Image: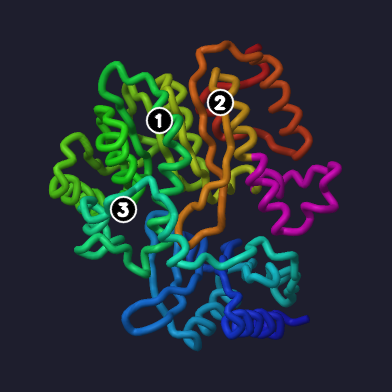
Amino acid sequence: MSIELQINEFTSEIIGALKENVFAKISLSGSVGEEKDLKNVYVKIVEIKSGVRLNFVYRYKTKDITKNYEQEEALKQIKDLLINQFKIATLLTLKNDIVFERVTSLKARIRKNKPSIKKLLDVDHDNAKVRKIGKLKEKKYLHLLDITDANGKVLAKSQDKYKQLNHYIEILSSILSNLNTDSNLKIVDMGSGKGYLTFALYDYLINELKIETNLTGVEFRPELVELCNKIAVECGFLDLNFIEGEIQNFAVTKTDVIIALHACDTATDDAIAKGIKTKAQLIVTAPCCQHQIRQQMEQTNTENLLSPIIKHGIFLERQAELLTDGIRALVLEYFGYKTKVVEFIADAHTHKNVMIIAEKTGRKSNGTKILQQIQEIKNTFGIKQHYIEDILGLTLEKL
């Protein structure tokens, strides 16, 4: 079936989901258009003063752009993006997961899978839950970051962000309380963005756990660095500061905790490597845009047991993400870290992804076995080299 007909069918599914109140969200991926820095687009429903809108987050390499559209204009935007920019679109509803995939320049197909979302979260119900970030009226940074109003009430448009902050702190709470804190806890948050999670973490450590903390946020965009430093000063967060820089080039000295959430592609590896080299007690990453391994898999096209499955683009993408992050976890274990991989809600606009949590144990690992496992995985899937091996100097020949 032609692409235009399939796009029309896909948008009809969107219209139906909105009418039946079963719409959850949309994600567009597999960027092939002229906008090289545009990586993904995420769509959800928001309620603003002028009414209900479809909220688009255009995720670029170094920035996010958010726009709200009425339904008709939103559908036009999705059609245009599928024609000119993206190969894959996934619509999540309470009835089905519906996947649009462009097969060739002239053909596309649509698949329906069982729903991965079982219910739409009710705002009032969610507010009744016990949250790690409480006493909202006292959290000035939440108001300055446009999450709450002046009275501490969570804004309708920021409900998802507020949930994400609490989920983040909940995941890390028990680990943070067990860290060695004989002196000031030194943390570097690489790719801190607008600082939502950075502020929440600092606040929790200082005011809830009563741990003296020195936290530095590293961000590429100067306007966000300026904004976050201004908010930190207004809130009296004396040991929270933000500096302009790229993860790859940022010089890390002795650090207890390294964090890199949503660092694109190999920037996650740069952050992990810096944590390993400085012997950080804790390394926390939520990777995204894992392209390096996928490109090698496509180039080598090595035959293996999964070849009949990963010939489909969306499965290849998921397998590449699994291999990328799986090898990262193995490398961390090689260097004496206990790793845990959990599901983390990336932000209000993205699908759930993984968070890799690595705690330094001091125990010696079976390094030879781990490197052999990594090599076997690479051979199976036609992977020549994982970027993290290069920057850490890991090769079997050195055994």
Residue 326, picture quadrant: top right
Image quarter of the N terminus:
bottom right
Identify the mark nearer the N-term, 1 or 3: 1
Q: Nearer the viewer, mark 2 or mark 1?
A: 1
Question: How is colour applied across the structure in the image?
Answer: rainbow
From mark 1 to mark 3, how far is it between C-alphas?
A: 22 Å
Q: Position of residue 378 (x, y in %)?
A: 72, 33
Q: Position of residue 65 (x, y in %)?
A: 38, 66
Task: Indicate the secondary structure of the residue bearing disc 3.
Answer: loop
Amino acid type, callout 2: Leu
Q: Which residues are magenta?
A: 295-323
- Figure check: 13 above or below 222: below
- Residue furthest bottom as drawn: 72
Is residue 100 visible in the rendered structure shown here? no
Amino acid type, callout 1: Leu
Q: Are marks 3 and 2 in contact (CB under 8 Å)?
A: no
- Figure check: 69 above or below 235: below
Task: Indicate the secondary structure of the residue bearing disc 1.
Answer: helix
Crowding near the residue tagged with mark 1, few <14, some 14–19, many ≥20 C-alpha atoms within 10 Å: some
Identify the mark nearer the N-term, 3 or 2: 3
Image quarter of the C terminus:
top right
Q: Which residue is mark 3?
A: 194
From mark 2 to mark 1, how far is it between C-alphas?
A: 19 Å
Q: Which residue is mark 1?
A: 176
From mark 3 to mark 2, how far is it between C-alphas?
A: 28 Å
Tell me the residue at 24%/42% (across/down).
242
Tell me the residue at 77%/52% (across/down).
310
Residue nearest the observer in this picture, 261 or 182: 182
